[in-house]
Amino acid sequence: MSENTQLRARDRVETSGNADAHKPITHRRGRAVGIVNTAQEKERNSGPCLAPGAVSVELAGVGHRFGARAVFKDIHARVEAGQTLVITGRNGSGKSTLLRILAGLLPPAAGTVTVQVDGETLDPVARRRALGYVAPDLTLYRELTAAENLQFFARLRGIHLTREDLIAALTEVGLRGRGRDLVGAYSSGMRQRLKYAFALLTRPPILLLDEPTANLDVDGIAMVERILAAQRERPGGGLAVIATNEPREVEWGDTWIRLGAEG
Amino acid sequence: MGRYVDTVGSRGVSAPARAMASGGSGWLAEAWALLLKDLRAELRTKVALSTVGLFTFSSLLLLSLATATLKEKLALDPLTNQMRPAWDAAGKMGLLWLLLCFAAFSGLSHAFVHEEETGTVMALRLSMSAGAVYAGKLAFNLLILFAVALVVTPVFMLITGMPLGAPIVFLIVMVSGCVGLAGAATIVGALAAKARGSGALYPAIGLPLLVVFLLLLLNAANTTFIVHPPALRLVRDIGGLLSYGILLITVSALTFSFVWED
């Protein structure tokens, strides 16, 4: 882990056997009572445990199914400003699906998702604009240059990017000098870096990262660590949710959800 | 079924959060940005223009060969017992629209299918409202269709000898036809893209819309070439075509969010 990041080493997530494939295993540490999954845990943690933060994400009994197959069910969690929630689980356990639900891109089959910014609850459409999203299935326009992509999405968010803003955004993700290249000509690592520039356009209070270091080199991984550290310290409050199975990335969390997988 | 808490409001929200929650730059500005982006990408890749253009011009070439002898021929009108051109102006205009319809449906699905296939639709859903996406894509399709019609119509007239008729009426029919066709192609393109059926499903979904549209167009085409059409007929045929286009776009705009959010 890079020294210049302010990320602290976390307790390793236990990966004990999960009797019920759909039931997530959760872990808590530190002051944050972030995740409550079972009725007993809910009971135990029902007291006032957190000072109200500027930003929070809460899952209450969230479940999802594709057709007859339940992917996960009854997930309870709460993340507040300054925290990072890590979602782990086997392939097909629903990590990316849960992130999509958090992003407001997919309605849950059961339960509620509550996202608050400055104490105000956001609906799914407003929520999408309050978060930065990096995921393998998110793609930027290959037929446009990196600068054109960022300008387009900034314009959609009501932001006018000056030349200096563009250079700063590209420099932050290690793409300085490559802004005029077509994204189609980028390597997979460069495209991953550009996704971070896209996600950080509005300096959102919530960052959702699915496989955050996919295709990134050592410098790229350090960049992600810097971004996460900055997110924790974000003025006004910031939090991150990560879906991963990489041991290094699991260490970045304060609280964890481990999803089971059927079969 | 799960539910989202839906209590959005402006009270107590910080400026950046309010900017994010309020929909960023506004509906029209978003649609305009999407149109400019699509035009920029189109100028670079020329996918829609080349698909529509190639289809149209190859059809025109075949048409010119097939109708080389037909356009001068006369036929006996069984109703009046008089000789008249075997291929009248209204028939030619009907054929022009048939050609434009197939060209539009073959090329304009690109607007949504491309976003879905390349995965950029997720970035759009994170950044834009459904209404703005529909407006932007509709504007793009309309511009492409206008451009194609502007080039194809004079060439078609040259090849087939189709007369102009009353210029104002002709212009209204062309504009109304393009508006209705772009409206149909846009919503059907969105449905096909969501159904992951891309090109194959496109004509199947579009057929019911296309049949009604072509019937209205043929009525309007007949009226275009009447020397002094009764006002009632003008309103019925041309107004009917225009109304269908507006109706199609209104219904599409109202239902698009369900398609987009699905």
Image (cartoon, coloured by chain):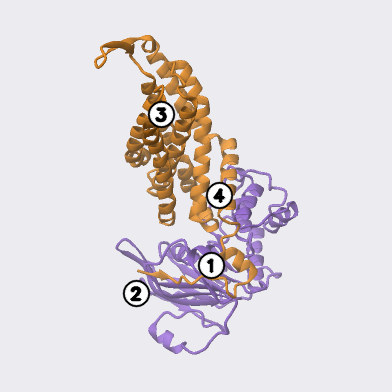
Left or right relative to A227: residue B239 = left
Residue A71, quarter of the rendered image? bottom left
Three-letter residue code for mark 3:
Trp
C-alpha distance separating marks 1 and 4? 32 Å
C-alpha distance separating marks 1 and 3? 53 Å
**Quadrant of the image containing the C terminus of chain A:** bottom left
C-alpha distance separating marks 1 and 2? 23 Å
Three-letter residue code for mark 1:
Ile
Q: Name the colour assigned to chain B in the rendering.
A: orange
The disc label shown at residue B31, or none: 4
Residue B211 seen: yes
User: Contact, CB < 8 Å: mark 1 with mark 4?
Assistant: no
Q: Nearer the viewer, residue A246 or A47?
A: A47
User: Contact, CB < 8 Å: mark 1 with mark 2?
Assistant: no
Q: Which residue is mark 2?
A: A20
Residue that appears at 41% across and 14% down: B65
Chain letter belonging to callout 3: B
C-alpha distance separating marks 3 and 4? 28 Å
Left or right relative to A174: residue B111 = left
Q: Are marks 2 and 4 on the same chain?
A: no
Element class at badge 1: strand
Residue A36, quarter of the rendered image? bottom left
Element class at badge 3: helix
Q: Residues within 10 Å of mark 2 (few under 14, many from 20)?
A: few
Q: Which residue is mark 1?
A: A242
Residue reaching furthest left? B78
